Structure formats: structure tokens, C-alpha cells
Amino acid sequence: MADETAVVGGIDTHTDLHQAAVVDGIGRHLATDRFETTPQGYQRLPDRLRSHGEVLAVGIEGTGAYGAEIARFLTANEVTVVEVDRPDRKARRDNGKSDPIDAHGAATAVLSGRAGGTPKARNGIVEAIRALRVVRKSAIKARTQTVNQIRTLVVTAPSVVRDKSRRLSTRQLVDTLARSRPSGEPDDPACAVKIALRRLARHQAPDEEIKEADKGSSTLPS
């Protein structure tokens, strides 16, 4: 009977559709199936796995990326989840990319013991901080790019612009440029540079994003 059979699942993860495979205790292929990355799709997966027997574990590729949510869902439903490394590039070149094969490989990797990693728990305060830090990191990168663009424009600007900015710190330079009121004809290179510098300096969204991210992190319980 099905409920007397021990089975192992494997999942090859993607953005919209995951591919799942089921093998029995000696590695024989029982089924493959695709399911959507939706609450309904997630619910269908454990039901499908359990229809073949007692689920010992499920191997998942990409538990830190596309497989994060299905790993959380299965863990919450008392299914043991094992992190599986993706096939190496040489194996993919030799054998070709195949979602059913990769899903089957994830299952057999768990069954054979080649895979035994425990996925990171992506919940609680650690996950909350991680999400906020993504915003902060992106904002810092954007701010750095803006400052670099300003510095590059200043270096190549006509002397009338460059000389006024030479001894200013980055903060002073950005503040001065943001308050400036360029005048002249747009087809004048000096005027065009002044306008461009002012617009770059007034782009203060990254600073605000950094402050908001830091504020959000500080309100989380320690």
C-alpha cells in the first residue's frame, strides 16, 4: 500500500513553476509534476508527494532564492527539507538542462546522502533585517554612483565651474550644487554642466531610503 512506502521528493525551482520528482526508498522514479509558485500550488505539492507514501524528506535547489518560499511552506507543514546544490556547469553542458532530470537528481541526492544541508530559516527578525538591508545596500550603491557622476562632471567641466568646486568636501559639494540656480543658455557647455550637476545633487532619494532603512532596523526587537 502507498502509505507503507517511504518516498523522497526533489524540487528544481524557478520563478513561476517548480518541477518536482518523487522516488521510492531504492531510488526508483515514481512521478514528476510541475506546480505553480502560488499558495494553491504549494498546497498541491505535499498532497501529491504524500499520495505516493510517507515523505522522508524533500531536496530543494535554491532554498536561498527561488526555493525560499516552498522551503518555508514545507517546513511549516512538518516536511523535512534538505538543501541540494545545483548540478555543476560541466554536468549541465554534458547532459543538457532538464527540469525533470534536475528534480530527480535533487531527490536521489537526498536519498544517497550526497545532500544533507539544512536550509537557513528565512523567517523572524533575521529575515526582516535582511530585507531592510537589501534596500539600504541598493540606496548606498545609488548614492555612490550619483556622487561619482558628479565628480566626473566636475573634473571635465569648464574652469568656471570646476574651480568653484575644487576644495569642497563631497557633502559640501552636493549641498552647494543642490542650492544652485544655473543661468544662461542651455547650449552653453558651462550652463549645461551646471544644470546637470544641480539635477544630480538634488536627487536625494538614496539618502532618504538609507535613513528609512536604518529607522526600520532600529525599531525591530533585539
Image (tube, rainbow, N blue to C red):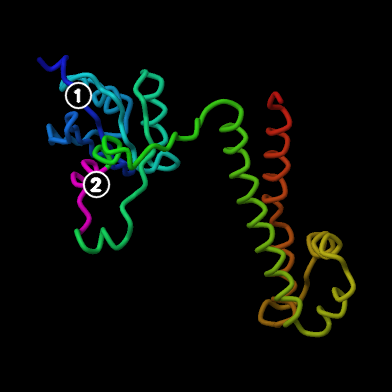
Q: Residue at x 69, y 34 (%)?
A: 217
User: In the orientation shown, which residue stands out farthest toward the left?
Assistant: 1
Q: Could you say which is closer to the camera, residue 34 or residue 136?
A: 34
User: In the orientation shown, which residue stands out farthest toward the bottom?
Assistant: 159
Task: Give the amino acid type for the residue marked by disc 1 in the picture.
Answer: Arg
Q: Which residue has dot 1 on it? A: 48
Task: Give the amino acid type for the residue marked by disc 2 in the picture.
Answer: Asp
Choose top left, top right, bottom left or bottom right for residue 79: top left
> Residue 208, labelled with which disc?
none
Q: Position of residue 156 (x, y in %)?
A: 72, 82
Q: Position of residue 48 (x, y in %)?
A: 19, 24
Q: Would residue 180 be found to the left or right of residue 41 on screen? A: right
Magenta part of the chain: 96-105
Q: Residue at x 72, y 64 (%)?
A: 147
Q: Would residue 100 be found to the left or right of residue 169 on screen? A: left
Relative to residue 166, is residue 56 depicted above or below? Answer: above
Q: Which residue has dot 2 on it? A: 102
Which secondary structure is most common in the magenta stretch?
A: helix
